[in-house]
């Protein structure tokens, strides 16, 4: 069974602070996706990282895929209240029938004024 | 922007009843998925579907579950005889190819009473 552990599980910070969320696994994935989920809604895709060592930036969010493609991190610079939400990493395993995702345990982020 | 749409947004059903959850995937996508999320838990893979057949299913997806693509646009999940433990958010997702990212619908909240 492939498992993805995220840390921290909960994070409460002040506006303007920086933070990093980690996503770790003992398994290798073909790619890793980061989603954000609001209460009662579906996960919304933020980014996909594919190549070991890859770094992608989305405004104030920086995503990195580990060299061995087993782990990833999400760094947010100068967090804002609008960044509040549940951040999920999901490892993808490609089979003939599609792109099966194994989701992480999630990081609940709260950014306060 | 194309999106995955799911209906209904909330379904309440009595234990033992059949329920059908409906999804309209993104129109040029070829791979379809169902995931579920029990309250407070991780998003879990149920099944993937390609070329009008199931390509992979998890151990959660037992004989009580079935999927169908009855026409060119809809993708349904049927639970034959619902149990209390089937209460969860059910998410439909689709991807264009087997190795491209999946986009999720808003989910159907199923409550079995």
Image (cartoon, rainbow, N blue to C red):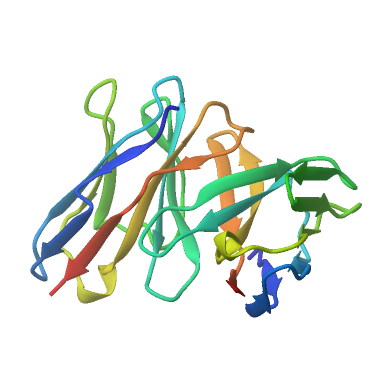
Q: Is residue B47 left or right of residue A68?
A: left
Question: In this view of the protein, which residue sits in the foreground, B17 or B54?
Answer: B17
Residue B24 location (% of width, % of height): 30, 33
A32 sits to left or right of A44: right
**Is B80 drawn above or below residue A93 in the view shown?**
below
The residue shown at (73%, 67%) is A16
Quadrant where the N terminus of chain B sits is: top left
Q: How many marks?
A: 0
Tell me: residue B83, above or below residue B69. below
Q: Nearer the viewer, residue A101 or A45?
A: A45
Q: Nearer the viewer, residue B46 or A76?
A: A76
Q: Residue at x 42, y 27 (%)?
A: B2
| Quadrant hosting residue B104 | top left
Residue at 40%, 65% in the rendered image: A39
In the picture, measured across the screen, residue A9 lies left or right of residue A41, that is right
In the rendered image, the quadrant that contains the C terminus of chain B is: bottom left
Q: Position of residue A14 (x, y in %)?
A: 68, 76
- Residue B81 horizontal/vertical position (percent): 15, 62
A92 relative position to B103: left or right: right
Q: Quadrant of residue B46?
A: bottom left
From this viewpoint, which residue is outermost toward the front? A113
Give the residue at x 20% y 71%.
B83
Nearer to us in this view, B106 or B14: B106
């Amino acid at each position: 069974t492939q498992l993805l552990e995220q840390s921290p599980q909960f994070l409460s910070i002040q506006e303007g602070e920086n933070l990093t969320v980690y996503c770790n696994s003992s398994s290798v994935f073909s790619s890793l996706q980061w989603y954000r989920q609001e209460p009662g809604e579906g996960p919304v895709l933020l980014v996909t990282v594919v190549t070991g060592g890859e770094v992608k930036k989305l405004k104030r969010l920086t995503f990195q895929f580990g060299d061995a493609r087993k782990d990833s991190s999400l760094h947010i610079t100068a967090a804002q209240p609008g960044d509040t939400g549940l951040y999920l990493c999901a490892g993808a395993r490609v089979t003939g029938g599609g792109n099966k995702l194994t989701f992480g345990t999630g990081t609940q982020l709260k950014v306060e004024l | 922007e194309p999106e995955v749409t799911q209906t209904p947004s909330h379904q309440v059903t009595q234990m033992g009843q059949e329920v059908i959850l409906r999804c309209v995937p993104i129109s040029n996508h070829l791979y379809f998925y169902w995931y579920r999320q029990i309250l407070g838990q991780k998003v879990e893979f149920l099944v993937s579907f390609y070329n009008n057949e199931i390509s992979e299913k998890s151990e959660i997806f037992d004989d009580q579950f079935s999927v169908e693509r009855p026409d060119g646009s809809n993708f349904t999940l049927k639970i034959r005889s619902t149990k209390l433990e089937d209460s969860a958010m059910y998410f439909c997702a689709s991807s264009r190819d087997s190795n491209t990212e999946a986009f999720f619908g808003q989910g159907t909240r199923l409550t079995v009473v």
